[in-house]
Image: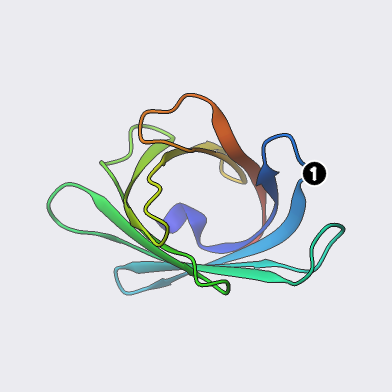
């Protein structure tokens, strides 16, 4: 999880729509990786968006992630131990009951990409983004 510690600039959005610029900041607190994503108001947005994650290893062979945003959205997902540079996340529970899955690929020390899918077994991406490290 230490790979992520620092500040990243990202572009992301629903597939087929313009992507938004965001800043993601990761801080390790003990065994918990805290991520805060900030999306300032941009074209097509009525308000800023913020999202927080807490990620930890459960000691039973998987990573657990919780999320909460400023619009009341929340979720809980898990990932098996990461294989190489790829993480496979599966939703356990969400505020709207719509479960999906996602993949994060760390392309090198300073870049990663992520893709979300709208169902647990879906193969059509619904949300995509890329991030570049700005500082550690």
Query: Height in image: 133 above or below 117?
Result: below
What residue lies at 37% left-to-right and 45% top-to-bottom?
Answer: 99
Percent x, y of residue 5: 51, 62
Q: Is residue 97 left or right of residue 4?
A: left
Q: Which residue is mark 1?
A: 18
Query: Height in image: 57 above or below 86?
Result: below
What residue lies at 44% left-to-right and 35% top-to-bottom?
Answer: 85
- Identify the image quadrant of the C terminus: bottom right
**Residue 35 in view, yes or no:** no
Q: Residue furthest front?
A: 96
Q: Is residue 81 left or right of residue 113?
A: left
Q: Residue furthest top?
A: 123
Percent x, y of residue 13: 68, 46
- What secondary structure is marked by label 1? loop
Q: Is residue 54 left or right of residue 136?
A: left
What residue lies at 57% left-to-right and 64% top-to-bottom?
Answer: 6
Residue 88 lies in what quarter of the image? top left
């Amino acid at each position: 999880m230490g790979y992520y510690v620092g500040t990243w600039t990202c572009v992301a959005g629903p597939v087929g729509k313009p992507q938004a610029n965001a800043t993601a900041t990761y801080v390790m607190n003990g065994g918990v990786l805290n991520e805060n994503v900030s999306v300032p108001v941009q074209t097509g947005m009525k308000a800023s968006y913020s999202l927080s994650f807490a990620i930890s290893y459960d000691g039973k062979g998987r990573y657990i992630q919780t999320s909460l945003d400023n619009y009341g959205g929340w979720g809980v997902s898990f990932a098996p131990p990461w294989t190489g540079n790829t993480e496979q996340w599966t939703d356990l529970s969400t505020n709207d009951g719509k479960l999906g899955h996602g993949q994060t690929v760390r392309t090198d020390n300073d870049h990663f990409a992520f893709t979300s899918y709208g169902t647990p077994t879906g193969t059509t991406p619904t949300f995509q983004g890329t991030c570049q490290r700005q500082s550690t």
